[in-house]
Amino acid sequence: MQSNPTTDIETVKDLFSAHLKERKARRTPERYAILEEIYNREDHFDAESLYIHMKTNNYRVSRATVYNTLELLVSCDLVKKHQFGKNLAQYEKSYGYKQHDHLICNNCGKVLEFCDPRVQQIKNMMGEILNFEVTSHSLNLYGNCAGGCEKTRKS
Ligand SMILES: [Zn+2]
Ligand SMILES: [Zn+2]
């Protein structure tokens, strides 16, 4: 998530509040704790590991709350959901972070990020040529870490 130090957690919370209100969803402390936890992270994670991490840090959250809060955050674009070739969905914070793409290691599951303006150029050009309004894209490159991986994937 190409970092941007100006992201203000209060702004993100306000956006989430507005979204919850609109959805007539309850604004519970658990949901804000999950949001904060996500914005404190710098990685790509799956729902289960977020839940376990919060449990380990003594947050009183249920697995169901973690899962449905993630979906709420995805639906208001505060969190981005990815499918990196496995069945497991991975998430990352997205508000205030630059558009970027990913390289994923098939062996250890490590996710690297890159940002190349040529991707934007392709979107513009293909949209023009094919008379198509491109609204989003997903570009994942798969392979293996050069020089071997630090750890072998658990699953
Ligand atoms: Zn990313
Ligand atoms: Zn690797």
Image: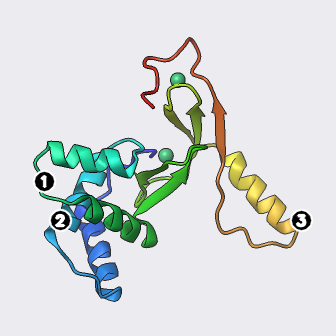
Using residue 120 as the reference point, say whether residue 126 is left or right of it. right
Using residue 39 as the reference point, say whether residue 71 is left or right of it. right
Residue 128 horizontal/vertical position (percent): 84, 67
- Cβ atoms under marks 2 and 3 closer than 8 Å: no
Please determine whether, in this image, residue 81 is positioned above or below residue 72: above
Please determine whether, in this image, residue 130 is positioned above or below residue 49: below
Lower sequence index among marks 3 and 1: 1
Marks 2 and 3, Cα distance to the nearest angstrom? 47 Å
Q: Name the kind of residue labelled 2 in the image.
A: Glu
Residue at 59% of width from left, 16% of height from top?
146
Residue at 66% of width from left, 69% of height from top?
135
Question: Residue 129 bears which disc, if any?
Answer: 3
Q: Name the kind of residue labelled 3 in the image.
A: Ile
Label 3: few (<14), some (14–19) or many (≥20) C-alpha neighbours in 10 Å: few
Label 2: few (<14), some (14–19) or many (≥20) C-alpha neighbours in 10 Å: some
Label 1: few (<14), some (14–19) or many (≥20) C-alpha neighbours in 10 Å: some
Q: Name the kind of residue labelled 1 in the image.
A: Tyr
Marks 3 and 1, Cα distance to the nearest angstrom? 51 Å
Secondary structure beneath label 1? loop
Lower sequence index among marks 2 and 3: 2
Question: Residue 59 bears which disc, if any?
Answer: 1
- Cβ atoms under marks 2 and 1 closer than 8 Å: yes
Secondary structure beneath label 2? helix
Q: Residue furthest right?
A: 129
Question: Residue 30 bears which disc, if any?
Answer: 2
Quadrant hosting residue 44: top left
Pick the quarter of the image with the C terminus: top left
